[in-house]
Each structure stands twice: as structure tokens, then as C-alpha cells.
């Protein structure tokens, strides 16, 4: 097979057992020893496999040849490994001219000689490097005894009979069947032979009766099973029988390009119809798909896409009645490369990267080899992306080699190779000498060196490479320095930390090789003040909170806590706390005192500065006094009296409602009486009107304030308010549709409750008061009330009275 390709086992065994291998034709087909020398260009300049050994099965005592052909720049040396160990030449095996290996007499354990079974690798090497082929597993051909023999069967005419035998062997045995010691006629469509050792006979007839044997054969041996008799009885009763699946599909695990056989045998009356589907609903397809017998599904040249759960269904014709059985098919694919690594050339001191991507089922595992040896991460070598990317930083002459990517899974393995060439310019300076690093402080290190021994005239500068000793190489950083600088002070480093340093000299043509790396650790220092916060928990307790510092524990450190009342000179403490603690509670403190709290961190280098906090507990004690604890007995008594208060409240509410209703009733009655009184006053006079008539006086009363003033000043109320109640026609706001009683004496006067509702109820008491005052003697003639324009003057309930500006009338005189 071509390089990087894995040969899969054949789907079917050899047709002719015990056929000996012909060594001479194979030798005649072998290629010449090595490819012709090339000019160093093209693919032959690289070292690669044109053919690799593949898995095979050997017959004990017979010869076997493991093929290997290599292309590359000569001279090329080829050797072989068995189970990882170099295989030495002997009389038992011979290295052929083209690099293939021939084992003259394949043997198993016994007779004091080791078994030839194992994993073989072809190894090729030239001046550029070394490559190793894929592993080829060589096993001896075997044949076991039958562990399942066919069983006697009785069937009805028109029915189904099934025989099965099972046997293990390498290679996989070929199964055939005999009836009465005669091979059965495979041209009869009623006879179905499945590769897994199953014989199905449908539409049974009387002549099918006989003794059946299973015959298994491969290159190792031939085995014949026990006989099993088939008895065919008369035709069935013809009664209805539910569809039944006698044998359903089994779970299978195959490799790509093999053949999958999914068996399904169903019976019933009428004969059921067998159909296949996938459980995931995807179509099965038609290419490479066929049905053997009455319902066996055959998938030739399987691929990974054929993996899935297959469902066999037996349906009764014309109905929905059916029975199902299912089996899972798993198809594995050997590892194969999607992206091969490419040979590269890089200047010394730079970074080289190889990328190798492989696919397969299950997903393959990738490993790297350098000149045939397993290459792991470490130093300047890094593996990323599930080992698919190999990165080599700061390459030098020792990194020049052939690198191989090996992808392997349970179905097989593949390999691909690439060469790294390190470009080294002539006349480059050597590495800087006597590199030293000395710690100056907790954050500074001084690095010094001497110039290289040779080729120093073209040096244009130096580059100092720095990284923490515990960090990977990719976290390295550099500082460029002038060619006249031979020491440098590095600052801003971390305390108590180990650093790695190395230096390169640069010229216009490239960099020198790196100096030997040196290590130096910065000095330690006392830790910084920790951040501290204080919470008052009560009148006599505090909680202190800060950030934990796990790094302190690495340097034998922790925290120290001290506290005191501000009025005292001495502190309580120190209280030693581990570095992982982040809080502490102080209790039994003086509620009236102000406390000073100090927290500091320490390590083996000393104590750091303290964080100081002042906190007063007086506020907490005052809040406690203002909010005394619950008096449970008082609260209980309050709960006992709550019911009584609710009852009293209900009685008060009912009483208020009754009074409100009475108030509304009496108010309505007062409005009616007042309305009637106004009608009498506004009706046309039948004779001389007495100035003592209380109607006008009653209408002039507008509020409590005016009533008091009338009682003191003995003045008449302005009659203008009457016109406000009954404005004349043509007043502002539009014509009034009500008739004017002064212009039409005979017209009835309508009383509207909405208008008179604005008069206060105190008008009735004012009426009596005014009548009593009207009996006083009048010194002059009676004054008349001249008509005036309607204007504001009436008050609604609760409104304050306004002083009257209209001329007041003299009190009326009795007898005038």
C-alpha cells in the first residue's frame, strides 16, 4: 500500500484453502534495491516510504514476506524492528535487496525458538534522519473447533428452516454447507448462505429433508461440524398466525470496505413482508445494498456513514400488525491524514512548526517521533491542539532531524514524515560567555556576560531572554541591548521568584547560538499591608475582614492581629492567624470605648506595615438602648386587649353612621322649609308689605360670621344675594329660562333645590333673631332695597364670609 495508507482486512476469506504461497513469483515482482541517486532535488531527496508492511496472517512452517520500499537520498540503510526491538539478521529471516523482510519458516512458540508473531516496523535512515513505518501485525493462521454446531429442525411444508454454526479462525473461515455429504445447490433461490455461518431454507418441501453439515476452511485447516437432521412434515393447517421474527439482526463492528450482513427471519400466516429502516430516519440508500432470501440485508463496502441502528419489521399483509427487531452497526475507519506535515528550513535560533491532522473512527491519537524516537513536550518542544501541532523554539543544529506524525486507533495506524533543516550561516559568532545573574533586591536582578570568542566584529547587539523558571517557554520575553553592553539590571520582577536567563549575539546575517541558561531568584521582602474592613456586630463585638493570601503560606507567613482601647497604651495580642484565614471576631469589648485595630502580614523576611482602623462601639450601644429588647409580657398583654379595641371600634363606627343618616334627613327637611319660605317672599305683594317680614331678612343671612355682625351692627343684609340666586334675564351666562317674579306677579315661583342647597342651615336661627330686632322703633323712613346686578356673594357650606360693600338699609320701623 502507498505511504500513509492502511490496508483493511478482506471482507471475505480466501476461496481455496490450503493453497501454498509461491515465493518465486513474489521475489520476481520485488523492486530494485534502492531508487537511483538523485541530484538532491525532488521527492527522492526526502526519506519516505513508497510501500509499508501491512497486517497479515502466516501459515506455520510456511514463508512470509513483509514488504517495504523506501525513497530517499542514498545511501539508505534499512533495518527492521519487532515489538519495538531491532531485529538482527539470522538464518531464520533475510533482508531482501529492496528492503523487504522474508521469514523462511514462520513458527509459533515451542522448540526453544521465539514465536514470529508480533508487530513489525520497517526503519529507514540516511544522512538527513530516520523514519519508521507503520506497525504491521503478523499472526499465525489458526482454526479452532466448532463452538456452535447446527441443531436438528422440524418444519412444515412452505415454512422456514434455519441452521447455524460458529467457529473462530485466522483468517476468517469460509463456511459452506453439505446435505447428505453433498454440497448444497447454491443456485436454488430457496437456499440462502450467509457469511457468518447461517443457512436459511424458505418454502420447505419434502425433498429438503436430510442431514446437514457445516464445513469451515481457511489456510490453516478444514473443519466439519456435527450433522443436523431436517424433517419436513405435511402442510400446515392454514390457520392464521401472527407475524413473528425468529432471528433479528445482531450488533456488528466492522472496518470500512468490509461487508455487513444483517439477518432477519420472520414467519407467520399469511407470510409476513419484511422491510428495513434506520432508527434515526435516514434513508438506507440503494448503492451496495441488496436483500438475500426473504429479508436479510447485505451492505457491501461499508463506510462510516453506514453506522447506525437498523430496524427489521415483519408486517402482516394488508394490515398494520407488525413485529420489529433491531441491531446496531458500527463501522470503524483507520487513521488517515487530512493534512501532512511539510518539510521546512529555518534559521538557527528561530521557531519551527509542524502541523499534522488525522481523521478516523474512533478519532485517532497522534504521537510524534524524532528520528524514530518518541518526542514528548518539554524544554523548547511544545505540543498543542491534541498533539496535532509540534512547535520547536530556538532551534539549533541538534534539532535538525526527520519528524514523524503517527496517528493510530483501533482500526489501524498511519504515519507521515517531514524534515527540519536548520540554516546556519558561516561566520556567525559563538554564544556569549560567562553569563551570570545576581539578585540585587526583591524586584531586581543584574545579568552580566562576556562577548563570544570568535566572529565578534559583526555583532550589532545582544538579546536577553527572560522568563520565570516555572513558566513554559512561550511566556518568555526579550530585551534588546547594545553591542557595548555586557551587563543589564532587570527591574519590576516579582519577589521570591526564580527566573531563567540566556543571551544571544546578533549580526546582520543572523543570531548566534544561545548561551547556557542561568537561574537566579529575587530576594524576598516583607509583605504589603493587607486590606482590612471592620463590621460592628453588636454593642461589644466586632468582625474583621480581609483578603486571604495563600502565597504567604509558601513563605512561612501569616497574619498578626492587635487591638486596644484608644485610651490605653498597650495592645492586646498579637493574635497569630494562618495565611488562609480571612476573618476574625472580637468579643467582650467595652461598649463605651473607641478601639484601635491593627492587622499586619509577615513571612520569613519580616513583618510588613500594619493596616490600622479605629472603630467606636458607642453608636451601637445607643442604638441598642433606643431599641430595647422585646418585652414579651407587655406584648402578650397588648395582644389580649386587641380584641376589645376592635369591638369598641366597630360600635363607634356604627354610631357615626347613624348620626350621618340623621344629619342628612334633617338637612333635607330644612331645605324644603327654606324653599317654601322663599316662595312666600317672592310672591307678588297683595297689600302693603311689612318691613318686619322675615322672608327677605332670612335670605340675606349667608354665614355664621355675617350673622354675628348683623346682631352687633343692627344692619340689614345686602339684597344683592337674592339676585345671585335668581339672576335677571340677560345677565352674563345667557338668558335665564325661568320667569322673573318681579315682572310677572302672577307667575308661580319655582323653587330649585340645587340652588337653595348653597344656603347655610343657620339661616333659620338668623330669621328669628332678625325678627326680634325688627320690633325696635325706627327713627326714619323705611329704606327700600334697590335692585342690583347679580354678583358673587353666596357662600357654600364651610366657606368664609366676605364683607358686604353694598349700602345697608336702615332697620324697619313698626307701624310704618
Image (spheres, rainbow, N blue to C red):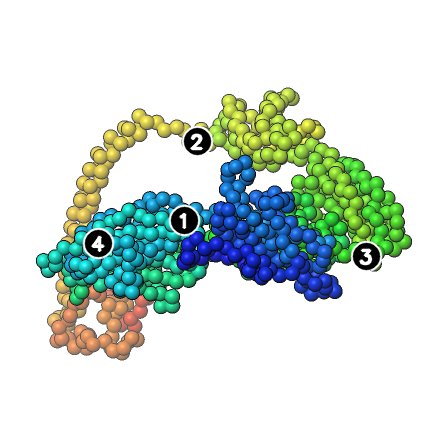
> Depth-wise, is mark 1 or mark 3 nearer the camera?
1
Element assignment for label 1: loop
Which sits in the foreground, 506 or 233?
Answer: 233
The residue beneath circle 1 is 221
Picture residue at 61% right of the left edge, 29% below the top: 559
Q: Which mark is residue 626?
A: 2
Picture residue at 24% right of the left edge, 68% below the top: 725
Element assignment for label 3: loop
**Alpha carbon separation for disc pair 1 and 3:** 66 Å
Which sits in the foreground, 628 or 768?
Answer: 628
Q: Position of residue 169 (x, y in %)?
A: 41, 48
Q: Is residue 193 visible?
A: yes
**Alpha carbon separation for disc pair 4 and 2:** 110 Å
Picture residue at 41% right of the left edge, 29% below the top: 628
Q: Residues within 10 Å of mark 2 (few under 14, many from 20)?
A: few
Element assignment for label 4: strand
* 11 up-or-down from 110: above or below: below
The numbered mark, 1 or 3, whose residue comes first in the sequence reads 1
> Depth-wise, is mark 1 or mark 2 nearer the camera?
1
The residue beneath circle 4 is 210
**Alpha carbon separation for disc pair 1 and 2:** 105 Å
- When asked about the image quadrant of residue 813, the answer is bottom left
- When asked about the image quadrant of residue 175, the answer is bottom left
Give the quadrant of the C terminus. Answer: bottom left
The numbered mark, 3 or 2, whose residue comes first in the sequence reads 3
> Depth-wise, is mark 4 or mark 2 nearer the camera?
4
Q: Residues within 10 Å of mark 3 (few under 14, many from 20)?
A: few
Q: Which mark is residue 425?
A: 3
- On screen, residue 809 versus residue 495, left or right, reads left
- Asked if labels 2 and 1 touch by Cβ distance under 8 angstroms, the answer is no
Q: Residues within 10 Å of mark 4 (few under 14, many from 20)?
A: some
Amino acid at each position: 500500500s502507498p505511504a500513509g495508507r492502511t490496508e483493511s482486512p478482506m471482507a471475505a476469506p480466501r476461496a481455496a484453502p490450503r493453497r501454498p504461497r509461491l515465493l518465486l513469483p513474489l521475489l520476481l515482482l520485488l523492486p530494485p534495491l534502492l531508487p537511483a541517486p538523485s541530484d538532491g532535488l525532488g521527492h527522492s531527496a526526502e526519506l519516505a516510504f513508497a510501500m509499508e508492511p501491512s497486517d497479515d496472517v502466516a501459515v506455520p512452517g510456511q514463508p512470509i514476506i513483509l514488504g517495504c520500499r523506501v525513497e530517499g537520498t542514498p545511501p539508505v540503510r534499512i533495518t527492521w524492528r519487532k515489538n519495538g526491538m531491532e531485529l538482527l539478521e539470522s538464518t531464520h529471516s533475510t533482508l531482501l535487496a529492496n528492503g523487504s523482510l522474508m521469514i523462511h519458516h514462520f513458527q509459533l512458540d515451542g522448540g526453544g525458538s521465539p514465536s514470529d508473531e508480533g508487530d513489525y516496523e520497517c526503519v529507514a535512515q540516511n544522512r538527513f534522519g530516520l523514519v519508521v513505518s507503520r506497525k504491521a501485525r503478523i499472526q499465525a493462521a489458526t482454526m479452532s473447533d466448532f463452538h456452535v454446531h447446527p441443531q436438528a429442525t422440524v418444519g412444515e411444508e412452505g415454512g422456514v428452516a434455519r441452521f447455524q454454526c460458529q467457529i473462530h479462525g485466522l483468517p476468517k473461515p469460509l463456511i459452506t454447507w453439505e446435505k447428505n455429504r453433498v454440497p448444497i445447490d447454491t443456485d436454488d433461490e430457496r437456499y440462502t448462505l450467509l457469511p457468518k455461518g447461517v443457512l436459511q431454507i424458505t418454502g420447505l418441501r419434502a425433498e429438503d429433508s436430510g442431514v446437514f453439515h457445516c464445513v469451515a476452511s481457511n489456510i490453516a485447516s478444514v473443519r466439519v461440524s456435527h450433522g443436523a437432521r431436517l424433517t419436513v412434515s405435511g402442510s400446515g393447517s392454514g390457520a392464521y398466525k401472527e407475524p413473528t421474527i425468529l432471528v433479528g439482526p445482531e450488533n456488528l463492528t466492522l472496518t470500512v470496505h468490509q461487508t455487513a450482513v444483517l439477518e432477519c427471519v420472520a414467519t407467520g400466516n399469511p407470510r409476513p413482508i419484511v422491510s428495513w429502516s434506520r432508527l434515526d430516519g435516514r434513508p438506507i440508500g440503494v448503492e451496495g445494498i441488496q436483500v438475500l432470501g426473504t429479508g436479510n440485508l447485505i451492505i457491501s463496502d461499508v463506510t462510516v456513514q453506514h453506522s447506525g441502528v437498523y430496524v427489521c419489521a415483519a408486517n402482516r399483509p394488508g394490515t398494520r400488525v407488525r413485529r420489529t427487531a433491531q441491531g446496531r452497526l458500527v463501522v470503524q475507519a483507520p487513521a488517515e491524514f487530512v493534512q501532512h506535515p511539510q518539510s521546512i528550513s529555518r534559521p538557527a535560533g528561530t521557531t519551527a512548526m509542524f502541523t499534522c491532522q488525522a481523521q478516523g473512527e474512533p478519532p485517532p491519537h497522534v504521537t510524534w517521533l524524532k528520528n524514530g524516537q518518541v518526542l514528548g513536550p518539554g524544554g523548547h518542544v511544545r505540543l498543542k491542539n491534541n498533539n496535532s501541532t509540534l512547535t520547536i523554539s530556538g532551534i539549533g543544529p541538534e534539532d535538525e532531524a526527520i519528524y514523524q506524525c503517527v496517528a493510530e486507533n483501533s482500526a489501524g495506524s498511519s504515519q507521515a514524515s517531514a524534515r527540519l533543516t536548520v540554516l546556519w550561516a558561516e561566520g556567525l559568532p559563538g554564544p556569549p560567555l560567562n553569563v551570570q545573574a545576581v539578585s540585587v533586591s526583591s524586584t531586581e536582578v543584574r545579568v552580566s556576560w562576556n562577548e563570544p570568542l570568535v566572529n565578534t566584529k559583526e555583532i550589532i547587539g545582544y538579546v536577553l531572554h527572560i522568563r520565570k523558571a516555572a513558566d513554559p517557554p512561550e511566556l518568555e520575553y526579550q530585551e534588546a541591548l547594545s553591542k557595548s553592553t555586557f551587563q543589564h539590571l532587570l527591574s519590576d520582577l516579582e519577589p521570591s521568584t526564580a527566573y531563567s536567563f540566556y543571551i544571544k549575539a546578533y549580526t546582520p546575517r543572523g543570531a548566534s547560538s544561545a548561551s547556557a541558561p542561568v537561574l537566579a531568584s529575587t530576594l524576598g521582602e516583607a509583605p504589603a499591608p493587607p486590606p482590612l474592613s471592620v463590621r460592628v456586630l453588636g454593642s461589644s463585638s466586632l468582625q474583621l475582614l480581609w483578603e486571604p493570601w495563600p502565597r504567604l503560606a509558601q513563605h512561612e507567613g501569616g497574619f498578626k492581629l492587635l487591638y486596644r482601647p484608644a485610651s490605653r497604651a498597650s495592645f492586646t495580642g498579637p493574635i497569630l492567624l494562618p495565611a488562609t484565614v480571612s476573618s476574625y471576631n472580637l468579643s467582650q469589648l467595652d461598649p463605651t470605648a473607641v478601639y484601635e485595630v491593627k492587622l499586619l502580614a509577615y513571612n520569613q523576611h519580616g513583618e510588613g506595615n500594619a493596616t490600622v482602623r479605629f472603630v467606636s462601639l458607642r453608636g451601637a450601644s445607643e442604638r441598642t438602648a433606643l431599641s430595647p429588647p422585646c418585652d414579651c409580657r407587655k406584648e402578650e398583654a397588648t395582644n389580649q386587649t386587641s380584641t376589645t379595641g376592635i369591638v369598641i371600634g366597630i360600635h363607634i363606627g356604627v354610631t357615626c353612621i347613624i348620626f350621618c343618616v340623621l344629619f342628612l334627613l334633617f338637612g333635607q327637611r330644612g331645605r324644603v322649609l327654606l324653599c317654601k319660605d322663599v316662595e312666600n317672599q317672592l310672591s307678588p305683594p297683595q297689600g302693603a308689605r311689612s318691613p318686619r317680614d322675615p322672608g327677605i331678612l332670612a335670605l340675606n343671612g349667608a354665614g355664621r360670621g355675617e350673622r354675628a355682625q348683623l346682631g352687633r351692627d343692627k344692619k340689614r343684609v345686602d339684597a344683592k344675594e337674592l339676585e345671585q340666586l335668581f339672576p335677571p334675564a340677560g345677565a352674563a351666562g345667557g338668558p335665564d329660562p325661568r320667569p322673573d317674579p318681579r315682572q310677572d306677579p302672577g307667575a308661580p315661583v319655582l323653587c330649585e333645590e340645587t340652588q337653595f342647597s348653597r344656603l347655610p342651615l343657620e339661616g333659620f336661627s338668623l330669621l328669628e333673631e332678625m325678627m326680634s330686632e325688627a320690633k325696635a322703633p325706627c327713627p326714619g323712613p323705611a329704606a327700600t332695597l334697590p335692585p342690583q346686578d347679580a354678583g358673587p356673594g353666596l357662600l357654600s357650606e364651610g366657606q368664609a364670609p366676605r364683607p358686604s360693600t353694598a349700602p345697608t338699609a336702615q332697620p324697619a320701623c313698626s307701624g310704618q
